[in-house]
Amino acid sequence: MTDSGAGHGRRPVCFNLRDTGQCRFGSRCRFSHDLNAKGPSNRSRHIPQSSQRPTETPEQEQARWDYNAWRRLIKFPPRANDDDHANHLWNDALAILNGDDRDRKQQLPRDLENEEEYYGIEHVKALLAKRSRSSGHAAFVNISKAFLQVMTHQALLDCLSVETSVGVLYNFFGGTNGTRAVPFLAHLGEVLVNLQLDFDQTVTQESKESTLIAMTTALRELLRRENRTRMNEDLPGLINSLENTTQVVAREQHSTTEHIVTNHISEIRAMIDRAKGLLAEEPEASHGMSLGFGLRSSYPHEFKLPRDRHDNDKADITKMKIFPTHEEILSDSAEFLPTTDRDQPHFLNDQAARHLDTHFRLYRHDTFGELKSALHAFLGALRQDKMALNNPKPYLGDMRASYYSKASISYVRFSNRRGLEIHVSFLPPVQLRNRSGPERRKWWDESRKLEEGTLLSFICIMGTAIQHIFLTVVERKVVEGASDTSKQRHSQPTVITQLAMQDQSIIETMLQLSTTKLHGTLLEYTNVLPPTFVPILENLQNMQRLGRLPFRQWILPDRGDADKTGRSALTIPPPVYARHPGFNFPLDCILLPDRKSIKVSAISSSDDSVLVEEIAQATGLDRGQSRALVAALTREFAFIQGPPGTGKTYLGLELMKVLLAVKIKANLGPIIVVCYTNHALDQFLELLCAHGVQKIIRMGGQSHSDMLEKHNLRVVSKDKGEKTKSEKFLLHKSYEALDQEEKQIGMQLSKVHVMQKKLVWQTFDRYLLRTYSDIHRQFRQVDDEGFQTAGRHPFEAWVNGPRQSASASHVDQSELTVEQYNALLQRARVNVQSLSAPERSQLLHFWSREIQSEAFDTIFEKLKGANATHGQIGKIHDEVDRRILQDADVIGVTTTGMAKRIATLQHVRCKVVICEEAGEVMEPHMLSALLPTVEHFIQIGDHQQLRPTINNFKDLSLESQRGVLYQLDRSQFERLSVGEPGRPSIPFAQLDVQRRMRPEISSLIRETIYPKLIDHPKTSERADVVGMRKNISWLHHDMFEDERRAEAHHQKSHSNAWEVDFMPALVRHIIRQGKYKSSDLALLTPYTGQLSKIRAALRNDFEIVLSERDQEALQRDGFAMADSASDDETETDQPSSTRAILEKRKLSDLLRVATVDNFQGEEAKIVIISLVRHNKEGKVGFLKTTNRINVLLSRAKEGMYLIGNTDTYARVPMWKKVIDMLRATDSVGTSLGLCCSRHPGTEIEVSKPDDFVRLSPEGGCNEHCTERLDCGHQCLARCHSKAMHEVFSCPQPCQYRHESCGHPCQKKTCGEDHGICQVKLDGIELPCGHTQDNVPCYLTRDLDTIRCSVIVQKDIPRCGHTLPVPCWTDPASSSFKCSTPCSVNLPCRHPCSSTCGECNRNDENGQMTTRHPRCTKTCGRKLATCNHNCPLDCHVGKACAPCFTPCEVRCKHSRCPLTCREACAPCVEPCAWACDHKGKCTLPCSAPCNRLPCDQRCTSVLRCGHQCPSLCGEDCPEDYCHTCSVKQDVRVDLMEFETYGEIDVADTPIVVLGCGHFFTAETLDRLMQMSEVYTQDKNGLFSGLKDVSASLAIEIPRCPDCQTPVRQHVTQRYNRSINRAVIDEMSKKFLVSGQARLQELGSEVDVVEKTLEGSRKEFTGMLARNTVAGRQTDRYNASINPKLHTRYGPSKALEKAIVEFKRKVADHHQPAAKLHQATVHAVKNSRSLDEAMAGLDIFTDNAAPFVEKDRRITLGARMIEIKKDTLVLEDKFSVVNALKSSSSTVSIIFPGGAPQQSTHSILQNCTKFINDCEEEKLPKLAVEAILYYARIVRLFEASGMTESRDRNTATHLREDAKALLGRAFELCTQPFQNADMLMVAVEEAMKLMRKEWYEDVTLEELASIKQAMVSGPRGIATHSGHWYNCVNGHPFAIGECGMPMEQARCPECGAPIGGQSHQAVAGVTRAIQMEH
């Protein structure tokens, strides 16, 4: 039988069998098991045994094999009717997605959609086009099910990092407008129906239902991603067909399958309806609207559809912009706000769509309503008066905002990490403008202004238009300023911001503002943080777009009749995951010990009293909690109401345990816990941790729990959040793309800004060339005849015409009509020079505007691309977080945190969400918590307590007159629990046993709100409040609340000064009882104004702690600090204290002060309440609502004390009832009854703050304390509590005497601790025989403990030294250290600076060891290249560093600017030494002079009037007059030892040196060795020049007194001797510094080599894997060549450095060579030189002696260049070979040319270099060059790049290389350094050259040669010693004493060097020029 593929002949060989010897598929394998077969994929590629792949586990290896096997299935196109192949493909793909290999799960969709390499898309297409016949229905269903399960697998749909690939798959799956998916799904549905009706058992019922679920899931996902599919005409029919299929296939009614499919179809219909615009028609009447249920609306105002009020007034909320637009802000039309009353009209018929629409609009208005009103008023005022922009306090209504004046956009940049950044600078607040920089910085650091994420408005006037831009804060920067106050005034703080909306028009406006630097106003909206509300609004839009609202039947119940009891008629089923038959919830995890197991069935009822009782008995829960537990488990949408103190949190904990117990069985995924506050969330999660739940993830950064720190998502993600390989690759590519975008956007931004500063040709060049080429031609610099315009560019000359300013920075911006512009343009095209100055200006303005518009458009498009890339990066990081979240058991998040991370959480597969504090959560937040996969939603809260907090109370609160229509602060929990008129309510379970309050307190809320509330027995056992007469009291007073200032920022808040004074006194009294800690108390008040004052009153006595929400409330209402950004100078400038108060601390041992609204969920033993309100109008304010009263009265456990006016609060019904109840127990009065714990019968009544001090000063009564103190004295304090009595300190004089000595106690009072006796005693005789004075008495009890301080001489046993030490010292102790200075000389010959004891220590074995510290002396050795000493710390064994002292070489013309280590350039200016007697020196300044010194005395007269005492030709020394100088006693004649006053300057003139010392000329002539450079006659006079070309100066002559070198520019007489030494020193520096640079370049070559080798494998592997073809080749070329150029970037930079070094060290740049050339030039150009030379009897040639060049540096640079070229060439050959071994058609463009092109030039350089080295007798360099030559030839030959016509050339090169290697072998016989190693390399190279040309050069062969070529360190020493030359003239150095003591070989040529016993070998000469 013959197998044939579709166009591929024989079947390919099975890779599993080929690679491993076995195949797990056996006979079912679709591939050939004939290993001899030749197929298209059976390539002869041998897999080596030593694979580079890291070690894999068996599971990982199996996963890799499985994936490779699957990928081979898509390497070939589909074959017709090959169901087996298709079944393998999709089932294997499903198995991979179900596996644990994350990398391959992400790779699968990428490979599947990769049309360039695989046929996955073709297989999808084949399946979608397939139509099944009756005989093949089962196979078709099975394949389709696997395919659809792959398409809907959570690994694809939930993974954020493969979103793009999944999108491509769905795009293809749908086809054009769904033409591919819809017919396929319709056919599949028909097949399922046929199978079901035929009772076909080949497909199981489970498989049919799974297929049906996968069909609807895939269709829903397709419609979500592809909007056009929703318009498919056959789609409605498909939906109907799916419904019919569901009825047929899902046998059981209300089954799980039916529920899932029905929900999917409901969402699909909603999306289709939206796409087709199924909106209700606009009502005809303006009042009332006909509703479907037959009622008439009585809507209170005109109903007007949201349309055309402004540009953001849309009927479809998905099209609305989140932030208000400019037109919207300026609009005078009322905003469309739909009511939450569902009986009122709305333009949407669909209830879910209406609900989402309503809450989106209301929530958006709550966020921006007041802000828009404030901006509307402000911008309106600006339209009336532009000067209003400078108003220091603009009117903003009720909106709290900070104002910053003189703001401007100072800078715009694009950051690859943060995107487009706008830097806004502004004037600092007035109170900061005169402060120092550090003070400003401190102020800003401690303030909470301009915090990250805050919303800003930038407003300015541009032209006549008012511009407004919303910004958000990214980072706040503050310029510290200098210490100079005047400079501080000009420094401005800067805030880095981003655009809140990135519309193109907004971006262009912002860029225009940045270029014009217009000043405007910056408004900061306190606590308006877009990250907290934007995600919620966007999520509501997305839910509306998709028509998605889980649990819509419960959230929006239809009208129905309630039963007779008035209870809800709704029956809520169990969650979908629990509807499987037999499912139950085991309660074993919460049972008490030894209790029988209980299981709660999913169909159990909370009304089952038997079950409830059984649970209560077995778990310890009360009946209400047990009932609530059953209700929560058995209802998919469950409500639990928990009145105060009933244990809601405890029940939630038990509920979590039960759910976690079935997590795996029900595949719940992580359970999400949502809380309103961070504190409540932390408490709940900490309880879970304490009960053993460890896989908890806490989201958000506001947790203050140490226990939860390791569970924070940020921490866990950092530790365990590993990215897959593909994610790392995508991140790398994304960041690379952002780097490119950053550069390109930066260029465009620069272009925009440059245009505003100056009109330059570069800006207009490309624009004119592209748009107006005829005009561009007129601005050419080179005309048609080739002449170039001189001077300015023609364009710039045209711009700056004769009648225009030089800068031409201002252009005429007047607008032209189209006709005018066209006419002007036509003239310009003919002759642009004919335009007048105004016309040119107008044309420039038009062109500038066009260029700017293009730049703006480019920036916008680039930003869109960058934002997409940022989004991709964000998705990858979110995907890492998502995986961590998915793996957790519990996810904890606040409502705000959930809003910020909603995009990530929506991809977490979780079925259960529990919302704590549900009564405080706004419905928009609750709707966002309905994640797509949720099946079980549990809300725990109490709608009778606090409602959600909203911003716009007046407009949207149900407590305000206008807000009744909207009721945004009514939670979903309250709405559904209470129920809506005519609609059933949601059943809820109520907890009824409270365990917090004592009965007297709980009765207040039981009688008013919770009639069924029961007190737990333990509440009756609460202790009475100590120090108080009653446990609950109301102090009535008549003190009015404080009047509010009109200018105050916090006009909404209130305070009462009298209550502020009373509360601290009451707190102190309770604390003084000694029973309560400060943390047992809580002070509550309804107002932030009162909170702020109470905090200030108590801060000196207590540590005040505020909750996070109270801090924010204070900040929001202006109490955290005065408005620091305002220009009001009277406001506070001390934010530091406020910041300290607002510091977040833990709640333990701190006094809690809070507002009522932020204390829900908290409790305290004693609660003190300041009610604040008492006014003439009788207004109660916030506390009129029962919710707040309920919270206020239910916080206390043991005692509660209210302070307020009862008459005011009695106006509120609930308050009246509470007051009446308290009056019934005599708990209301004008005074509080205090109780003395020691005198309980004493009545104490306090009615004002001062009464506490007067009546209970110490917490008791006013009587004296009658109890005796422990010391026996009477207590002198007033009556106080027992606790205070125990800590009372007795003030009586102490009568105690110490028992041991009888001395009296030295403490002043009896209450102090007696301590030890400190009486001082003298004459104490110690055991050593000495006496000691001033000894404390307590020490005399044990004389051995007293240390005798008498100094005695003691011998040190370890070292033998004798030291004076205190008598108590024990020299034999191991801790004793001898302090005698260490006398040992270190190896550096410096004495050790440590002590004997420090250097000689015992080791761990007790043996004496000597270890001297590192020498700290200065090295001080003389440097080799100059006269300086080494200034570094001693560094024995290491060479001294080069000298960095400024060079001292100087002459009459100039001085050397280099450092001492660098070789100077000799001065080649004409020598300035001349006189009338001997003439002028005609040589260059730095050459040895060619004139004779003059011995005549100078005839010049000094300023003093006397004759100059110096010689002719020298500078006259003004201060050295022989007659009047004070230097008469200075010794100047070193031969006769005469002083200056004793000599006759007429006979012996003086010479003054540069150091200031002076001597007779005769003395200095001898010291300067003038006889060595001049000839003398018999009288000793200078008669001629000596030849100095054959000898070298030993050193630069020095001053005989101070040894300072004689300077050329001071004393010219000795320049012939000095210059000879200076030029020799220059040559030495040149050689040493050059050698050092050679070593540096050599190291850089090594780095380049390692870099190329490190990246070579990856790059060549990438080439080998590439198989692109066709149209993809150009794109691949465009990406691969830049990478290639990047690889060679370091080598190009090194090449430049080598070329520059070669230039510097070229022969003509050597100092001696430069001087020689200058000398020759001077000699040839001297007119009288012949006569002068003849007269002096010298030869012209000797006047310019030639100095032999040392070419080792030059040749060394060339050697490094050859090595670098060889390495790069070798790498290029590797790239070419990799490209040839692949089937790629990619075209590689090498920088510097292809390798075959550069081979010949490199070989020519090598050949020339080899010859030069042999000529210079440098065999070592020659051998190395020959080895490189051979390597290059072999690489070229083995590359296969030589064509047949060039083979002869290659053969000749090969023969040349062999010949050169023979020469190298001979050279290696010479004994130069490393000759033996190089000989090994030569032999290896010879072996290599014997291989055939077609044989590859292996890495091992090259490595052996390279290893042999590694030479030892070489260079020229920089330390002291003596220098010598070998017989061939190569310098070398001998260190230490500097004399030869051993023989060696010259490292360069191998000649003998060194010597024995200070005698050098033959041929070695002293290199004097290298020593000095």
Image (cartoon, grey):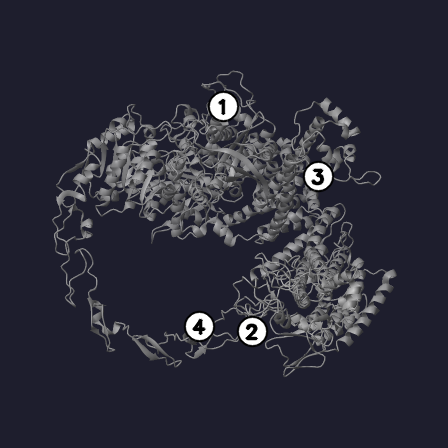
Marks 2 and 1, how far apart at CA: 100 Å
Which residue does the numbered mark 2 point to in the structure image? Answer: 1537
Image quarter of the N terminus? bottom right
Kindly state the secondary structure of the residue where label 4 is placed: loop
- Give how far across and how far down residue 1310 sits, in percent: 16, 56
Q: Residues within 10 Å of mark 2 (few under 14, many from 20)?
A: few
Residue 1908 is left or right of residue 893, and the answer is right
Residue 55 visible, this orientation: yes
- Of mark 4 and mark 2, the one earlier in the sequence is 4
Q: Is residue 1402 visible?
A: no
**Nearest the eye: 350 or 1217:** 1217
Few, some or many residues within 10 Å of mark 3 (<14, 14–19, 20+): few
Q: CA distance from mark 4 to mark 3?
A: 70 Å
Mark 3 → mark 2, Cα distance in angstroms: 78 Å
The residue at which mark 1 appears reads as: 381
- Residue at the (58%, 56%) spot, across then down: 1503
Three-letter residue code for mark 2: Phe
From the top left corner, tell me how far across and down residue 1555 is, in percent. Answer: 57, 64
Q: Earlier in the sequence, mark 3 or mark 1?
A: 1
Sequence-wise, the earlier of marks 3 and 2 is: 3
Q: Which mark is residue 1394?
A: 4
Task: Give the residue type at disc 1.
Answer: Ala
Q: Secondary structure at mark 1?
A: helix
Q: Earlier in the sequence, mark 2 or mark 1?
A: 1
State the image coordinates of residue 301 (x, y, percent, origin top left).
46, 18
Question: Is 1952 above or below relative to 831?
Answer: below
In this view, the residue in front, 1548 or 790, is 1548
- Name the disc covering residue 762, or none: 3
Q: Nearer the viewer, mark 4 or mark 2?
A: 2
Give the Cα distance between marks 4 and 1: 82 Å
Alpha carbons under labels 4 and 2: distance apart: 46 Å
